[in-house]
């Protein structure tokens, strides 16, 4: 039996190909993990499982989870789309469907950051992207609704649409104000009075 001798160049190319394959697999795994965390986070929000949602968020943004419990902003379902990862941050294009019948679309970006090789949702940045996305979506949807209904539109319906638009705008402005300041933590209970006599 005769031993085969491979040229050094062939071995170098083989090692490079194996390295490239492992990097590609690692990159796909990282992308899958970021998307999976985003999906699990929104599922937890829809199911009002705030403990699970809290476990999937960055430590410094968990205080903003209370803003997602607001019934005015409640979504019925969600969809995730394009994923972009850069410098330890991931952004997953997300659409929340709210309203009575889930007809109101609110586009946003679910923003995640990498902590100890684990993707976590940055709720503050995610809500920040919701403000701009929601305002654009509301304007687009009201415009298309008015275009379709313009022929038979009476004044009371027009007033109701205006009120809806103002209400949504006020809600988004309030959310933007809430995001600008950190939520107020409850005041701690005062320490027990040391001069009191034990019972």
Image (cartoon, rainbow, N blue to C red):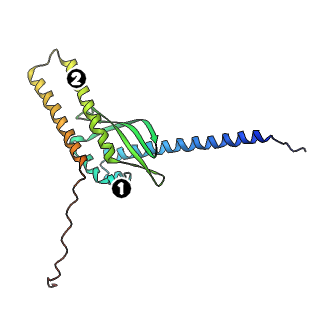
Foreground residue among 57 and 98: 57
Mark 2 surroundings within 10 Å by alpha-carbon count, few (fewer than 14), some (14 through 19), many (20 or more): few
Foreground residue among 122 and 48: 122
Please report the residue visible at 15 percent of the width from the left and 27 percent of the height from the top: 161
In the visual, does 102 lie left or right of 85? Answer: left
Residue most extreme to the left: 156
- As helix, strand or loop, the secondary structure at mark 1 comes to helix
Q: Quadrant of residue 11?
A: top right
**Quadrant (top left, top right, bottom left, bottom right) of the N terminus:** top right
Q: Which residue, given by chain and number where applicable, does mark 1 sit on?
A: 59
Q: How far apart are marks 2 and 1 (CA)?
A: 40 Å
Residue 157: x and y, percent?
Answer: 12, 24
Residue 103 shows up from this direction: no
Foreground residue among 38 and 10: 10
Residue 188: x and y, percent?
Answer: 21, 66
Q: Looking at the rendered structure, which numbered label has been put on residue 100? A: none
Please report the residue visible at 14 percent of the width from the left and 19 percent of the height from the top: 153
**How many discs appear?**
2
**Quadrant (top left, top right, bottom left, bottom right) of the C terminus:** bottom left
Residue 170: x and y, percent?
Answer: 17, 38
Q: Which residue, given by chain and number where applicable, does mark 2 sit on?
A: 143
Foreground residue among 1 and 5: 5
- As helix, strand or loop, the secondary structure at mark 2 comes to helix
Please report the residue visible at 23 percent of the width from the left and 53 percent of the height from the top: 183
In the visual, does 33 lie left or right of 7? Answer: left
In the visual, does 189 lie left or right of 22? Answer: left
Residue 195 shows up from this direction: yes
Residue most extreme to the right: 1
Residue 88: x and y, percent?
Answer: 45, 46
Residue most extreme to the top: 151
N-terminal of the pair, mark 2 or mark 1, is 1
In the visual, does 99 lie left or right of 90? Answer: left
């Amino acid at each position: 039996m005769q031993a085969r001798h491979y040229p050094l160049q062939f071995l170098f190319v083989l090692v490079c190909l194996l390295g490239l394959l492992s990097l590609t697999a690692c990159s796909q795994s990282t992308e899958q993990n970021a998307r999976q965390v985003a999906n699990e986070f929104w599922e937890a929000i829809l199911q009002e499982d705030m403990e699970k949602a809290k476990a999937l968020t960055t430590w410094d943004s968990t205080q903003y989870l209370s803003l997602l419990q607001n019934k005015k902003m409640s979504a019925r379902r969600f969809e995730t789309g394009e994923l972009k990862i850069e410098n330890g941050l991931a952004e997953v294009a997300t659409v929340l469907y709210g309203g009575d019948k889930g007809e109101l679309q609110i586009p946003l970006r679910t923003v995640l950051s990498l902590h100890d090789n684990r993707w976590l949702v940055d709720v503050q940045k995610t809500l920040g992207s919701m403000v701009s996305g929601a305002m654009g979506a509301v304007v687009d949807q009201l415009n298309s609704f008015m275009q379709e209904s313009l022929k038979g539109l009476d004044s009371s319906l027009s007033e109701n649409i205006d009120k809806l638009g103002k209400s949504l705008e006020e809600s988004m402005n309030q959310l933007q104000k809430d995001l600008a300041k950190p939520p107020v933590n409850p005041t701690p209970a005062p320490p027990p009075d040391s001069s009191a006599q034990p019972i």
